[in-house]
Amino acid sequence: MKFWLALKRASRSVASAKSRTAILALVVGICMMSLALTVSFVSSSYRLMKLGMDLQGRRTCNIGTDISPFVEGNGSKHHLDLEDLKALRERFSGVALFLPDSGSSRILSRNGRHVKSFVLGNDPSIVLPETSWRPIAMDGRLVEMGDLEGLSRVCVLNTVAKEALFGSERPIGKEIQVGEMSFTVVGVYDDVVTQKLGFKGKNSVILIPMTTCMKRLLNVTALNSLSFFVQQGNDTEAVANQVADLLRKRHGIIPPRKDDFSISTPGQMRQFFDEILHQVRAVAALIVGLAFLLAAGVLAQVQWLSINHRRTEIGVRRALGATQGDLSLDLLWESLLVTACGSILGLILTAAALPVIHRVFYAAPDNYSAGSLFSPYTHMQVDGWVLGACAVATLFIGLAAGVLPARRAARIDPVEALR
């Protein structure tokens, strides 16, 4: 009964001071929104980095080069090319599987509709056992080996490109323009990445045969990058060193001359992800700490001012028999009620902020370059447990901020307060 009476008195007090309650609720709501978005950012970053490690695979390495494959004179040995790929496949047959990567961006067109898209060369001859990324045919078929051998002008659209160019119309067998070249659509695909993360990507992507991409569309021999999967029974680091030695020999690199390529092993990638995540956590902890301090400081300060303005009221209540415990309980309830209002407002502000964040950082189909598949901003999700945890944490802030002012109010001398 004592607690319910205190809650009733606190409710009347909060309702009577509308301006003060609104300001405090707004401060608490902004702090909770900051807390929820920060925790969600860290959570999404961790999820995406973990997915990146899963995609990388425990035995998958990447070979990259800082030299653009599209500069003039790409016959020189300052990039990865098809001859490098051929030599690596011959040398490491039965030891490692090599998967080339080539592509660029182009405008896709059909019947007056246009969309800027990634155009990726696809080599279906190699399927890496531990690689999670793979296209899933939703309609029609994927790129096949016969397409590579015949340099076929066929393409497979992802769901975003399909919607942008065809809407609800079935695209199989129809032609689209990829830049200045015509391609026939043979399939529509989705991928495991978007299904695992539970969101739909907004980047338009199409797959075409690797040979067609390099020899017809781009007219280059250079690869964007090259990945290789080390088969069981072989040491990944040792194979990576042997691959580096072969590339140095082919590129005519003699130490101390610097390599014109780089090889990223799973161990290096894991260390890189750990360093990034550590930095993200440090920044997040700073933001969360500042949000806590701001909310607690503002709440405590306003409570102090409120007590000073209500000294007469407190003195009357003490004179009429209210105990120190009664006053402390009333003020704690007030602090919790205001914080609860702020938590509800924080939920509303968080829900309102997410579309803005997605709008700013999320790439629209006609502007593919503004967002990346692995961008934590682009695919930041606020989970229910995050909102619940932030709401509970916010209530604790309100409780902590109200303790000292409540104890101070309880110690007010009724005689002094009534003078």
Image: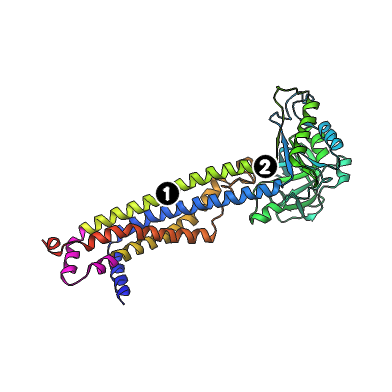
Q: Can residue 351 be seen in this view?
A: yes
Picture layout, residue 355 above or below residue 177:
below
The amino acid type, in three-letter code, at marker 1 is: Gly
Q: Which quarter of the rendered picture does the N terminus lie within?
A: bottom left
**Labels 2 and 1: the sequence-earlier one:** 2
Secondary element under disc 2, as helix, strand or loop, is helix
> Which residues lie in the magenta part?
309-330
Picture layout, residue 410 above or below residue 273:
below
Residue 336 left/right relative to 147: left
Quarter occupied by residue 207: top right
Residue 303 left/right relative to 108: left
Front-lying residue, 264 or 190: 264
Position in image of residue 369 (x %, y %):
63, 40
Picture layout, residue 130 above or below residue 95:
below
The amino acid type, in three-letter code, at marker 2 is: Gly
Query: Which residue bears the numbered disc 2?
Result: 267
Position in image of residue 59 (x %, y %):
74, 45
Quarter occupied by residue 271: top right
Secondary element under disc 1, as helix, strand or loop, is helix
- Report if residue 320 lies within the magenta region: yes
Label 1: how many residues lie within 10 Å, few (<14), some (14-19) or many (20+)? few
Front-lying residue, 272 or 208: 272
**Colour mode?**
rainbow
Query: Which residue bears the numbered disc 1?
Result: 289
